Amino acid sequence: MVRWRLLDDLKPKPGAWNMALDEVLFRAAEEGRAEGPVLRLYTWSPPCLSIGFHQALHETCDPAFCARAGYDVVRRSTGGKAVLHDDEVTYAVVGRHDLPPFAGLSLGETYGFIAGGLAHALASLGLDVALSQRAAAVAPRGGAPCFLVPSESEITVGGRKVVGSAQRRGARAFLQHGAVPLHLDYRALALASGQPEASIPAYRAAFAGVADLNPAVTREALREALAEGFRRTFPEAWDDRPPNEAEASAARVLARERFGAPWWTQNVPGANAAGPERERTGAATSR
């Protein structure tokens, strides 16, 4: 029987920790040490600009602005474009290719199933959600934020994107995580990602936060809706289990030695990457 794990991180965490714990969960599935799929919900403090695995820091980040604003900067292990994580709820799904409910599914099919959970969640908050099927090739480098890049299984409300995600696929497992913003600070996003303020009108037209569209939505309501949306989409057994000590210890090491380390953030580890891991990039597919 499939048994999902809900890992609900109620206390906001720094960006390096958030990326490290996602990596720990992915590695456990990839190495066969975990069988059931995981849904993790989390938030960020301080605000953090995350850049894609393949992105050059100088092309997609203004480090001086981020330092003045008190923002963290991290490099994700997934592909895609830059995202400023602030007033949002972030989700992560870890599953195995060889076990239900994702057994035998292609990358696009996996995206579609997860998009169904996200769509159920946002519809329950009174949003008129549409799930598009457009897809576009995305250059891994470049400074445009992720929500400007079209993708397959893209979740929109009134033609504006409301979710940005990225997926990493290993030989045995995948990690997909994504941002569901409540409110967006378009100017801060432009400046943090090194883009001109003239970009702001295009950002406003292309994407929005869910509370920008429905002011009644709170962070807690969004968190509960995401959990329930996934339960409806994947009606298997669910357990609520926080990180255990081994997971927390491994995440602390990765946060310190990789995701919080200058060598990882400032370099481009995925520029010439080849091998079993692939990233799906795009806007609802690139955080």
Image (spheres, grey):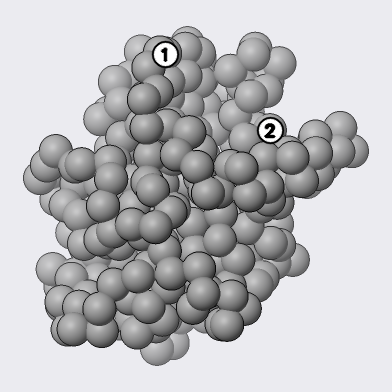
Task: Return the residue found at the far bottom.
Answer: 215
Disc 1 packing (10 Å; few <14; some 14–19; many ≥20)? few
Q: Which residue is drawn at 39% across and 57% down?
A: 58
Q: Earlier in the sequence, mark 2 or mark 1?
A: 2
- Residue drawn 28% across and 41% down? 140
133, above or below 220, in the image: above
- Answer few, some or many: residues within 10 Å of disc 2's Cα (few below 14, many 20 plus, some between 14 and 19): some
In the image, taking residue 157 as reference, residue 164 lies left or right, namely right
Name the mark on residue 9.
Answer: none
Residue 73 visible, this angle: yes
Q: Position of residue 284 (x, y in %)?
A: 29, 52
Closer to the eye: label 2 or 1: 1
What's the CA distance linking mark 2 and mark 1? 18 Å
> Which element type, helix, strand or loop, lies under badge 2?
helix
Amino acid type at circle 2 is: Val
Residue 24's quadrant in the figure? top right
Q: Tag count in the figure?
A: 2
Say left or right for 9 vs 205: right
The residue to which callout 2 is attached is: 24
**Front residue of 234 and 14:** 14
- Which numbered dot is residue 276? 1
Q: Whole-percent x and y of residue 287?
A: 38, 53
Vertical placement of residue 274 versus 124, above or below? above
